Image (cartoon, rainbow, N blue to C red):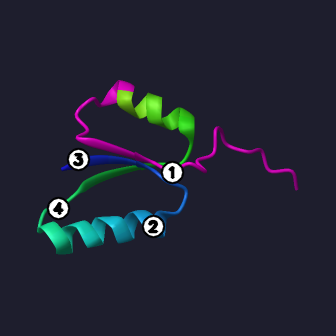
Amino acid sequence: MKVLFAINNESTVDSIIKHYKVTYGEKIDATKVYFFRNITETLKKDKTFDRIVIHEELEPTARKNQD
């Protein structure tokens, strides 16, 4: 199964992938994005995803470093 993950926390995505493989015995081909705009950009390039998982706290855009 091909899944687009739009989740800020990479360890959460890794846990989901591992749990799915153990539970269903099927490998997930995962693509990870970290900003909302990247979802649309990724989907324009590749329309073959079976599922999209979006976290509600996904950043809308990259923040500039204020240091």
Residue at left offset 46%, top offset 70%: 11
Q: Between marks 2 and 1, how big is the CA–CA gap?
A: 10 Å
Residue at mark 4: 27
| Foreground: disc 2 or disc 1 | 1
For disc 3, the neighbor class at 10 Å (few under 14, some 14 to 19, many from 20) is some
x and y, in percent, of residue 10 in the image: 48, 64
x and y, in percent, of residue 47 in the image: 27, 29
* Sequence-first disc among 3 and 1: 3
x and y, in percent, of residue 31 in the image: 35, 49
Q: Which residues are magenta?
A: 44-67
Q: State yes or no: residue 58 in magenta.
A: yes
Label 1 secondary element: loop
Residue at mark 1: 55
* Sequence-first disc among 2 and 1: 2
Q: Between marks 3 and 4, how big is the CA–CA gap?
A: 9 Å
Q: Between marks 2 and 3, how big is the CA–CA gap?
A: 17 Å
Which quadrant: the C terminus? Answer: bottom right
Residue at mark 3: 2
Badge 1 amino acid: His
